[in-house]
Amino acid sequence: MSFLPVTANDLPSQLNSAAAERKRPAVTAIPAGIVPGLVLVAMITSVAYSARGFSGLFSPMILAVVAGMIYSNVLGMPGHAKPGIAFAQKRLLRFAIVLLGFQLTLGQVAGIGLGGVCIVAATLGATFLFTVTLGRLIGVDAKLSQLIAAGTSICGASAIVATNIVTDARDEDVTYAVAAITLFGTIAMLGFPLLAPAFGLDQHAFGLWAGASIHEVAQVIGAGFQNGALSGETATVAKLTRVAMLAPMVIALGLMARRGSADASGAKPPMPWFVAAFVAVVALNSLVAVPAQIHSAIALAAQIMLTMGLAALGLQDDISQIRSRGLRPLLLAFSAFIFIGCFSLILVKFA
């Protein structure tokens, strides 16, 4: 081993160089680690939006889940992409849920009246309890039952993702729940407008029924406007009222998880940060007039981030594990679909 002489003039520059080397990983490691996964997620999201242009039936979020699953199960998921995929699945999804608050104001909730709000709230609560109870009776895993219950009673895939932050179910359960909710929500979107004349529903009543019972926001809008402009507007407001109830539902699930934990100090807090932020955004949107262009941009950003998060979810799912869940969860989702449709219809007709 040889030693090179170091002069007093060389020492400061060498110390500065060493300090720079120590600092460099802290600055670049995190961005460099998530870039490959984010690029992959962005590519799948682009495919989902392109496919939406051809199909026109399924939302980009659902198509992104399917595309992600096909990619990971056919080509496999690259190891270096995992940090970015995890970032999209967790942080992007939570921030997107916060941005959903810009779609709702307290004035919109008041637009359907106290009776409409009560119908929405009663339908949500009854459907959630029915689904969780039936899931326990037929032997469906409790966490998967809660995901199906949230997706049916509140707002589809967004509610499933938000609920899973508290329930912490397996990724395969989240994918199963999203797929089942999408299937029956699509059936409702196509079939409910055909039933309006048979049930003697005017535009307001049908809009309230659609908004209180159909799963996804996009599906509600599609069904509502098939029956007229007033029907579509009423359905949208009723549905967004259900979206607002996502916050208290997640808080309630957090309290249940905390109470059921053997070590309450280790349980998740009953008020996740994204729920508090969602409520704050709704309040802000109610008090401050957001320009239409900014509002549209925020809505688009929320949808893109939700799509990216669900694409990441699809990338981490193994189809064989989903198949192992069997038909019972599908039966549960179907039963919840029938229940929410019938229960809300009775309230709209006779309440």
Image: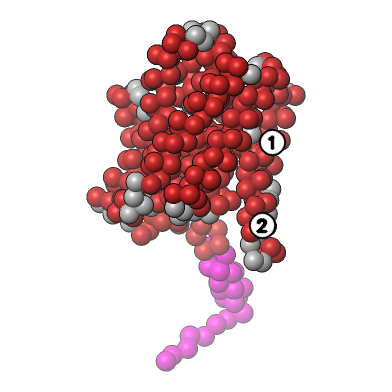
Residue sitting at 40 percent across and 31 percent down? Answer: 184
Quadrant in which residue 185 is drawn: top left
- Say which residue label 2 marks: 258
Q: Position of residue 44 (x, y in %)?
A: 35, 40
Mark 2 residue crowding within 10 angstroms, few (<14) / some (14–19) / many (20+): some
Q: Nearer the viewer, residue 110 or 39?
A: 110
**Quarter placement of the N terminus:** bottom left
Which label's residue is closer to the chain start, 1 or 2?
A: 2
Q: Please state if 334 lies on the left or on the right of 283 as rendered.
A: left
Residue sitting at 44 percent across and 36 percent down? Answer: 335
**Quarter placement of the C terminus:** top right
Q: Is residue 10 magenta?
A: yes
**Color theme of the render:** secondary structure
> What distance separates the C-alpha of mark 1 from that of mark 2?
21 Å
Picture disc at residue 279: 1
Q: Nearer the viewer, residue 28 or 206?
A: 206
Q: Nearer the viewer, residue 182 or 292?
A: 182
Label 2: which secondary element: helix
Up-down: is 248 above or below 112? below
Type of the residue with mark 2: Arg
Q: Position of residue 38 (x, y in %)?
A: 43, 47
**What is the magenta range?**
1-24
Between marks 1 and 2 in the image, the one whose residue lies nearer the viewer: 2
Residue sitting at 66 percent across and 66 percent down? Answer: 263
Q: Please state if 107 lies on the left or on the right of 92 as rendered.
A: right
Q: Please state if 336 lies on the left or on the right of 242 as rendered.
A: left
Q: Position of residue 346 (x, y in %)?
A: 55, 21
Type of the residue with mark 1: Val
Q: Is residue 75 magenta?
A: no
Q: Position of residue 69 (x, y in %)?
A: 32, 46
